[in-house]
Amino acid sequence: MITISDINPNDDLVFFCSEDISSINTYFSKEELNYIQSKLKKDEHYFTFSRLHQQFFFINDKHQKSEDLEKIRKAGDSIQMALNAEKKESFSIVGVSDKDRLIALVEGIRLGNYQFVKYKQDKKKNTLSEVKIQEGVMTDTEVEELNIVLDAVCFCRDLVNEPIIKLDAVKFAEQVEAKAQEAGMKTEVFNKTKIESLKMGGLLAVNKGSIDPPTFTILEYKPENAINEKPLIFVGKGVVYDTGGLNIKTANYMDNMKSDMAGAAGMAAVSIAIAKAKLPIYIVCLLPATDNRLNGNAYASGDVITMYNGTTVEVLNTDAEGRMILADALSYASQYDPELVIDMATLTGAAVRAIGSNAITGMQVKARTWTDLLIDSGYKVFERIAELPMWDDYKEQLKSDIADQKNIGGVEAGAITAAKFLESFTNYPYIHLDIAGPAYKTSRDSYRNVMGTGVGVRLLFDFTKQFIDQQKK
Ligand code: BES
Ligand code: ZN
Ligand code: ZN
């Protein structure tokens, strides 16, 4: 929690400082000032020292690039670790010259401080709960907005971290709906009967091997002051658990598949944040959800499925299930006549093989300008996007002898063929984000923490604000 308040000089203190340290003279002895100056001269980005029980942290304020904001987030994580180790509950940040840098620091602290310990008996809970900042750098509204976004990242992580035994498709929809209603959104959750009556063949096919029903959740936010007539639509892959189905995942490839709904969790979280922050924009969020399991009735290789839009798909791998459920949601999106649709999904191992696990692969159709804006947001919040091409030759790989197309391509360019499959269900400007790499960490990665990272939430919140600014112009 961030609050604006006066600085108590006896608090633990974080200083933003450049080589000119005259502004912090009053806090330190001559000896200490010499030490600080020598560290700053050595160009150390971040350093710390203590005086009895009081800890001081210094962030060198000289640099201004986006990589430097990332260094500040990481320093924020180190600071929260040091303060929690001493069981501190709050501390103050002093001498900030720039809002973006303060935000980066708070992000690192708050997201590093996040824990998912509800299933541990020995919870070893972090004590830190308040970050105090001085008046003048951020307005009350900006502070509130930052709190909302960071809460949303944590909400996304909570959903991703919850194991399948605790969070099936129905419970996922319930949790999202409750939070969205709190934020004043209009919500609707389609149950299995409704999904059947709508003939969402892709979602139903994936759900066939499950004993739990699927859900299709719709969140809508349309404030009176919305700057757009046609909505911005967010679609998320909500595979609450991916066994692979009959093409079962082997070795340890199944271990982290509770996270296969990270796209849906992220889209739900950012939509709720947009509503809570009362951004002047009309948005819709579509969240198809099911587990991908196998039983006697599971969908099988060779099956031909009629999708929601009436086209047919030859299933040649039941583990390519994300695109089956997303396809129905993307066709469903058409009826809103959207300005832009963005989907986010833990879709392919191929995306991870292509660019590793620290970035998102992005692909676009008829959305060049929006994509450039999104890529900019990616650098700013350091959830970077590497764009892959969407040339039509990749589509050749999806040709089927029996149906309109297959659900898998060949061995090459798997992230792109998946996107080409999805594209065929769209008729509007479209951006596809594959977060299979950055959505989940098996070991702690600084402020991105361990397990669900909440990737996409800060990215799409920032993008939405840019989208609003652009539309106003
Ligand atoms: N959920 C997986 C993709 C994934 C892999 C997410 C690793 C996170 C980490 C997806 O449903 C899947 O299994 N994709 C297959 C597609 C293939 C069968 C065409 C893959 O990438 O191997
Ligand atoms: Zn799969
Ligand atoms: Zn999957």
Image: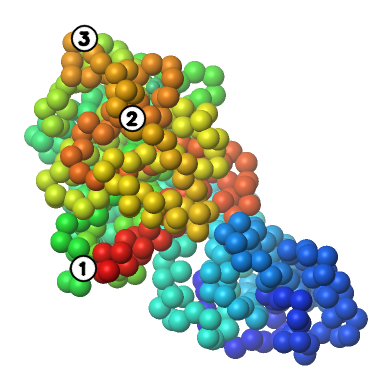
The quarter of the displayed image where residue 54 is located: bottom right
Marks 2 and 3, the one that precedes in the sequence: 2
As measured in the structure, the alpha-carbon distance from the residue carrying label 1 to the one carrying label 2 is: 35 Å
* Residue to which mark 1 is pinned: 226
Query: Which percent across, then down, holds residue 192?
Result: 18, 36
| Residue 401 badge | 3
* Residue to which mark 2 is pinned: 391
Horizontally, residue 284 falls left or right of residue 455, namely left
In front: label 1 or label 2: 2
Amino acid type of the residue that numbered disc 3 sits on in the rendered structure: Asp
| Element carrying mark 1 | loop
Q: Nearer the viewer, residue 61 or 439?
A: 61
Q: Pointer 1: residues within 10 angstroms few (<14), some, or many (20+)? A: some
Above or below, 119 against 34 in this view is above
| Residue 82 badge | none
Q: Residue at x 82, y 84 (%)?
A: 28
Query: Which percent across, then down, holds residue 207?
Result: 26, 28
Q: Pointer 2: residues within 10 angstroms few (<14), some, or many (20+)? A: few
Above or below, 378 against 225 in this view is above
The quarter of the displayed image where residue 358 is located: top right
Marks 1 and 3, the one that precedes in the sequence: 1
Q: Residue at x 46, y 45 (%)?
A: 385
Marks 1 and 2, the one that precedes in the sequence: 1
